[in-house]
Every structure is written in structure tokens, then in C-alpha cells.
Image: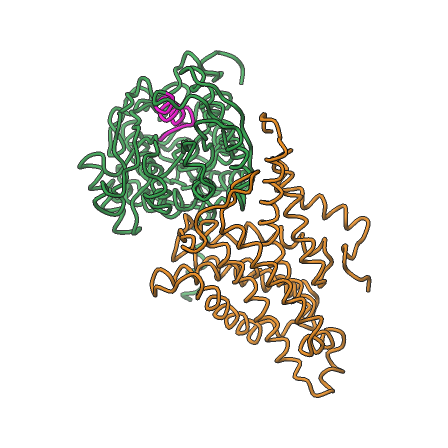
Chain colours: A green, B orange
Amino acid sequence: MIKLSLVLGVAMAVLIAACSKSDDVDEKVTDGAIRIGVLTDMSGLYSDIGGQGSIVAAELAVEDLGGEVDGKPIELVSVDHQNKADIAAQKVREWIDRNGVDMVTDALNSAVALATSKVVAEKKRILMVTGAATTRLTNEDCTAYTIHHSYDTFALANGTGTAVVKQGGDTWFFLTSDYAFGHSLETDTANIVKKAGGSVLGAVRHPLSASDFSSFLLQAQNSKAKIIGLANAGGDTINSIKAANEFGLTETQNLAGLLVFITDIHSLGLPVTQGMYVTSGWYWDLNDETRAWSKRFFERMGKMPTMIHAGVYSSVIMYANAVKATGTDEADGIMEWLRNNPQSDMFGKNLTLRKDGRLVHDMYLMQVKDPSESNAAWDYYNVRQTIPAANAFQPLSESRCPLITGGSS
Amino acid sequence: MSEVGITLDSLLGQLLLGLVNGSFYAMLSLGLAVIFGLLNIVNFAHGALYMMGAYFAWIGLTYFGIGYWWSLLIAPSFVAVFGMVIERSLLQWLYKLDHLYGLLLTFGVSLIIEGTYRYFFGVSGQPYPVPELLSGSTDLGFMSLPNYRGWVVIASLAVCLSTWFVIERTRLGAYLRAATENPQLTQAFGINVPLLVMLTYGFGAALAAFAGVLAAPVIQITPLMGNNLIVIVFAVVVIGGMGSILGAVATGLALGVIEGLTKVFYPEASSTVVFVIMALVLLVRPAGLFGREK
């Protein structure tokens, strides 16, 4: 008897769910829940800068929101995209079609972010990219539903490139990761270097996750450039820096890590990284608020958060604020509201969304400390300069985004 | 592509670096060839065993103060024992089945090992210092070669040659070859073939771990370090001819050099050149360059 009623109950539930699905257009928050998908690299070379930390950051945000927005629960889902754009796009499509996901965050890896942004725009949901770096997301490939949150290749190039040229590093050679992100970072940095009066002597492109960097570094060494720009990330940057030290490049040339995360510094140690410039959208030791949040993060992860983790937290808070204010999870309304209402949270103040999808905020130019200056583990940076929001990102006047230029996409 | 002109010096430098990388390929593919030759197992766990070797060295240094030279001995021994446990508990049931089963099982084992290490150590990796004796570099005229890289070439050649000598020129090696050729008959002569097989897998695992310890000071030790290498090493074994020891070593070194040259002339293709060569070799000689047609 119990069994029968159970079966009936399940059947009823399925029916009700099916019915409510068909008229969910009328509801303010579809399915009665706010679903957020954390799309990240859980097992590959970027899993320390995103990965489990991104999920924890999103959980912290949900906790701070009390687990709900106006009585509607916030649910988190996550997936390992394995750094494969096709897997990511397919998973996100499934999330939206079957699981009713409203917002996707992190989207580490530029190839993943580019593929996902198309799916999300087609389905009219929202993608808040905190992990990927390519400026294509707000230029050629911009959509009305992508928010590029934490940083991008222009901002990195702008911060580090300008500072290094100013210090006299006016000839550059690039070591570039051979995919969308690396190319984007190389191009953006080369432009900044030339604008600042420097010159680019050449570049070598290496495959993602190359097992050995000595050959590439030897080419960089032969270029006689003063600065070797590392247009790569994660494990590739770490192995480049390690090999550069081994081959004695650092005695005659200087390295400029264009996308270096605090986890990379932690892994390499200060003796080989000291003096390097790093541009970042966030650092755990900026102010009391960031320190307090990072302490909570550290208690769960056993390491300090990267700017991507902080970005994931901020993206969830921003999205929830928008749902609360507009009373709906309808994407156009939320994007509109966010464009008109700059946000402030632990990530930064006055986070302003531009029409091309770029979230504009201050960036920070930092320099890695000497081992003697560092008081504790994770005490790695001196903040050398705050790059004001107005100058930190690519100006709208240079935008190639069809939403700005009026061209067809 | 590099816009800087390619000079003779830089070409020589790249050849030498290719030789260093080739040494790793040679050592790893040697282990694979030995295991395949005797066990008929396509050992996909080889990359994970290589990674374990590097981690044992790091753990030894960090927690127990065991230096590099001792690690060269201790880490391979530990991994060999681990390998023998795997062989006795899992692999021995698969010898009569198709190669595919061994491949799938060892692939699964490597995923478990890598996942476990990733859980404990993350992917950013751990640094391992170059031993004091080998720090610094030597100016060769055309480039300055870190002493440690030179040592890698010497150590790996020594290991490869002694392996070849043991298998081809000693009584133990003769038993091994006999067991490969005809296990039943060898057993009938009173030779303990299962023991021989277990020791062989242990030895293959130790070779991988030895390569791992050698690699530790050169690259960041991460759970994925074997993963990035194993596919290339498999291509090396296929090109050399499955099961051929000499083939594995010669092909390993040669492909390291070819890959090094590709990095100069068209770096974008450096990760694929090995597979292009593999496809070409398979078209012309399906058994590999040094393999025998069965």
C-alpha cells in the first residue's frame, strides 16, 4: 500500500513539475529556485586557481545570502569541464535545458568561456566569467548576456606591460601558450609595449601543458630581448619560470609573468619569483574585508583564494542582488539592472557593468616580495600601484564589440 | 614562429636539449617495452608510476630529510613494491585476455593514483631543488648547459644500457626472454614464471620511478606530470616496435631530438610531430621500426 502511494506520489510530482514547466514564463523566478552553475577545471592544470576553490567561494556567497533570495532557495551545481570547450558547451546546454540553471560562473579557460557564451546567449541566461581572460569576450565575441568579471588580458597587459617598460624593459620576446588566451594576451601586451615606446623582437608559441620549456626558453634567450613576456598561465607559467632560472636566463634577462596567480608564487617560492610584477584584480591582503573573507576561505581550503575565487563569490552576490531588486531571474532585466546599478562587495567597490559586458573596477599592480620582507606564508605581494577603473581596461572607444560599434554580430 | 634568425649555435643547443628530453622518453619507453614484452600488458599506469617516483623523492626530502642521491635508490624501490602489488592483485588475472583489458585496467589505476595525489597535493605542484653537486652550468661554447641536464643524459643512458645488457647478455635475461617466447615450456624447465613476471613489472615500475626522480629537479612535481608525457611515450614505443628494447631506447632518443628541432622551426607542431611520425611509420612498417612481424 505504501509502495503504491509512493509511486502515485512520484507520478503526481512529475506531472506537476511538467505542468509548471510549461507555464514558467509567467513565474517571476522560474522553477521557484535560483540555480547557479560553477563551470570550472576540477582536475587539470587550472584546478588550483579555480576548481574546488571556486565551488567553496560560491558556497560562501550562498551562506552570506542566507541560502535564499526572497524565499527562493539558491542551488549550486558544478562540473569539471576538463578544459574542453565542447564538453563545457554541451554541459551548459544540459544545465539550462534540464536543470534550469539561471547563471553560470567561473568559466575558466578562454576557449571554454567563448564556447559557453554562445550557448548562454542563445538560451538567454547569464554567464559571469571570472576565470577566463581573453578580451574577445567583450570584443568580437561579446553578447548581451556575458559579464566579464575579474580581469582580462588587456588589463593584465596594461598593468604589467606599462610598468615594465617604464622601468627600462623596452625590448620584449613572448613565450605564448598556443590557444585563444595566449594569443590574446600576447597581442594586448605587444600593443601596450609598442605604445609605451618599446619594441617586440619575436615570439614562440608552445602547446598547452608542454612537458618541457627549455627549448622555448633557449629561443627566448637567443633573441637578446631584455624582457621575456610569459603569455601563459598555471602550470605552464610555473615550469617556464623554473626552467628560466635553471638555464640562467634570469641573470641577463627579466621575466614578466603576464598572468601569475598567488598559487603559482606559493608553489614556486619567493627566491625564484622575487621582484616580479604581477597585475591582479584582487589580493587577499588588500583590506580588512578581503582579509576576513580570505580567512573563512582558508579555513575550508587550506590555502588563500585567488582573484578568480573572489570573483566567483562576487558574481554570485551580484546576481542575487539583481534578482532581489528586479524580482525576476529574467536575463534581460537583470543585465539592464546591473548596467544601471554599480555594485560593491568584498571583491571591490563601484563594480560597473559596461554595455560590452566588461565589469569595470580598480586593478592592482603588485611586486613579489623579497623572502626577507615576507612575514608569513601567503604574504607575497607589495601593492605598488592602484590602477583606477577608468584606466584599467580597454576603453570603449577601441571596442570591436558589435553591441557598441553597431555592426551585426 | 620565431622571427629571430636560426643560428648554428642555437641549433646545436636545441639538439642537445632534444637529447635530454629524449633520455626521459627512452627510459620510460624502455620500461613499457619490457613490460609489454613479457606481460603482454599495455601499461597505461606508467605515467602515474613516473609521477609517484618524483613525489616519493619530494616527500622524502620534505618530511624525512632524505637527499637526492638516496632518493634515486629509495623511490624506485618503493614504487617497484607498489607495482608488484598491483601485478599480483590485479594484472595477473588479465594475461590471457585481449590487450584492451590490461590497457583499460592500468588506465583506471593511473586515474586513481593521480586523483589521490591531486587530492592531497593540488595541481600547482611542488618544487624540488637541484642537488648541490650538480648545480651551476657548463659553458659549451654554443650554449650554457645546466650540469644537471647533462647528468640526466648520462644517468639515463647508463640505465638503458645496463637494462639491455641484463636482458640480452645474462642468464636471468635469458630466462626472461624464454618466458616471453613460451611461458609453458619455460615453466616446465622448473623456472618460476609468475615470480619472473612479478619482478619484471616491479622493474618496469622502478624504471618509471627512476625517471621521475631524475625529472623532479627539472620540472615542477605535479600529479599531472606523467599524464602529459605518457601519450608521447606510447607513440615512441609504437614507433620503435612494441616489446623491442633497443627500439624503445633508440626511438626515444631520436624522437626527443626531432621534437627539439620542431620546436625551433615550427613550435606549434612540437606536440604533434611525434604522432605524425607514428602514423607514417605504421603505414610503412606496421610492426614498428625495430619490431618483428609475428
Residue B272 placed where, x, y %? 65, 42
Magenta-highlighted residues: A147-165
Q: Is residue B167 visible?
A: yes
Which quarter of the rendered picture does the C terminus of chain B lie within? bottom right
Residue A131 placed where, x, y %? 41, 36
Tell which of A234 and A71 is nearer to you. Answer: A234
Q: Is residue A148 magenta?
A: yes
Tell which of A251 and A142 is nearer to you. Answer: A251
Residue A395 placed where, x, y %? 39, 15
Q: Is residue A209 visible?
A: no
Is residue A259 shown left or right of residue B170?
Answer: left
- Is B286 rendered above or below residue B207? above
Which quarter of the rendered picture does the N terminus of chain B lie within? top right
- Is B165 rendered above or below residue A54? below
The residue under the point 55% across, 49% down is B228
Q: Residue furthest left?
A: A288
